[in-house]
Amino acid sequence: MAKAPAPITISTLAAMKARREPIACLTCYDASFAQLLEHAGVEVLLVGDSLGMVVQGQDTTVPVTIEQMVYHTACVARGRARALLVADMPFLTAATPERALAAAGRLMQEGGAQMVKLEGGAAILDTVRQLTAQGVPVCGHLGLLPQSIHRLGGYRYQGRDHAGADAIRHDALALQAAGAGLLVLECVPAALAQEISLMLEIPVIGIGAGAETDGQVLVLYDMLGLYPGRSPSFSRNFLPGHASVGDALAAYVQAVKSRAFPAAEHSPL
Ligand code: KIV
């Protein structure tokens, strides 16, 4: 009997980075899509708090609660067999180490998450240290931070000037030193994302960050054209020209693996 493929772990992703094999990641919010994504070869399923916008119809990710994240993470966990399951820590749950430990505990114990993702740099380093010291695998998230949308005043590229780029470089190194095992870089210039990917030992997953990161992630509802709102210019709808959702997902994985996606038009900077 054929052996089942080994589960994807953080070590698998580190080995993929070492051999320069791009990592395919997508957001996922339910069990049926978890199965489809895995079947297409997606290695990392991210239960993103983008579900607030694409599933719940909220204007931002800010209203998403830990209860809702646990619910969707558990749905995805029931559909996955092999992919690494990463869940977002919702707004303010990383504000103190105590709150973060409680939220991460729920995502892992009730939701079945294997890693938690936190937005931010310098302000959350102590939290990241405490989570990793307690055995919680952490994915950082730098660049555009959607949970800070009301402070930022809009979904804009980050790290475009010297000081902004320097802060992102510095935060990336600090998150790695604090124990993060993975980093998402959102909406930063492609050259900066490439530089950070080469500089860090941990894998870097880009979204709106050019083709030279160690992997790519997109919001599932954007890459299937399901979201009725405006999709970001760095995204691509993979459904046209494909006979099924499964074929479109497989095309995404293939485009990530061959670095055909993102193309120049998806990386405006
Ligand atoms: O919530 C989310 O979907 C995310 C991705 C955009 C990386 O954080």
Image: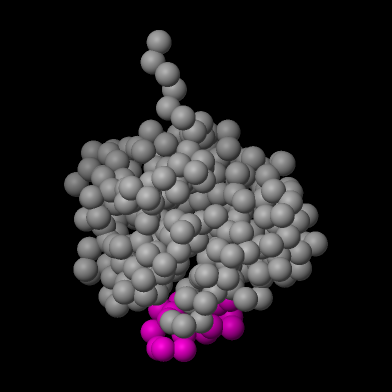
- x%, y% of residue 16? 38, 46
* Residue 134 in the image: above or below residue 195: above
The residue stretch that appears in magenta: 148-164
Which residue extends farthest top?
1
- At x 66% / y 63%, what residue is drawn? 128
Is residue 66 visible to the viewer in this orientation of the structure? no
Q: Relative to 55, does residue 97 appear above or below in the rendering? A: below
Q: Given the current orientation, which residue lies at the most extreme left position?
A: 241
Q: Horizontal placement of 61 versus 205: left or right?
A: right
Along the line of sight, the residue nearer the viewer: 136 or 30: 136
Residue found 46% across the figure and 59% down from its top = 201
* Image location of residue 131, percent across then percent down: 70, 57
Placement of 1 over or under 205, stated as above or below:
above
**x, y percent for residue 257:** 28, 48
Q: Which quadrant would residue 176 be assigned to in this image? A: bottom right
Residue 190 x, y percent position in the rendering:
32, 72
Vertical placement of residue 214 versus 35, above or below: below
**Does the magenta-highlighted stretch encompass residue 160?**
yes
Q: Is residue 117 left or right of residue 6?
A: right
Q: Please say whether residue 170 is visible from this viewpoint.
A: yes
Lateral position of residue 27 relative to residue 118, left or right = left
